[in-house]
Image (spheres, grey):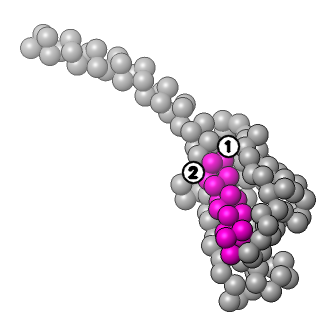
Amino acid sequence: MAELMVTLGLISILAAIAVPNYLAFQPGQRLNGGAREVLGKLRWARAQAVEENATYIVSFLNNHTLRIFNDTDLDGTWDIGEWKDDIDLQLNYSDVTFTPTGNDPKFTGRGTVSTGTTTITITNSSGSKQVEVTPTGNVKIN
């Protein structure tokens, strides 16, 4: 019985040390995941534009939702009948938000961006990361 009590005491001490460290680690992981999610969606939109030789636009609806759509009539806005996908970043990363700077990225069939450089700053309580889309179509995390 004494050995069991000692073992439970040691497990309790280890848990008391480990749980706060684990909880402090989570916001950074959510920030990294959110940045990778945005990066992946932007790269996917570029790949689809090249594959279909079409124009794909990524627009930012609010501070946590983005829309990817095939702009078949080339008017720069989503219209009924044009394929779209709305991605809410907070479904998987609850405290992550983003702020875009520049125009919405408009990927052409050649893989380039016709709207100039766009920077998306992803933030939460642990800090921030930036995803940059260059005119050449390169998408990277800074």
Dominant secondary structure of the magenta stretch?
helix
Instruction: Classify mark 2: residues with Cα within 10 Å, few (<14), some (14-19) or many (20+).
Output: many
* Contact (Cβ within 8 Å) of mark 1 with mark 2: yes
Instruction: Look at 21% across and 11% down and name the residue there.
Output: 6
Which image quarter holds the N terminus? top left
Residue 124, numbered label: 1
Q: Magenta region: which residues?
A: 35-52
**Residue 63 % position (x, y):** 73, 59
In this view, the residue in front, 13 or 22, is: 22
Q: Residue furthest bottom?
A: 81
**Residue 24 % position (x, y):** 55, 31
For label 2, the residue is 93
Picture quadrant of residue 124? top right
Q: Is label 2 in a helix, a strand or a loop? A: loop
Instruction: Look at 87% across and 57% down and name the residue there.
Output: 135
**Residue 138 % position (x, y):** 78, 52
Q: Is label 1 in a helix, a strand or a loop? A: strand
Instruction: Look at 77% across and 63% down and name the residue there.
Output: 111
Residue 78 appearing in the image: yes
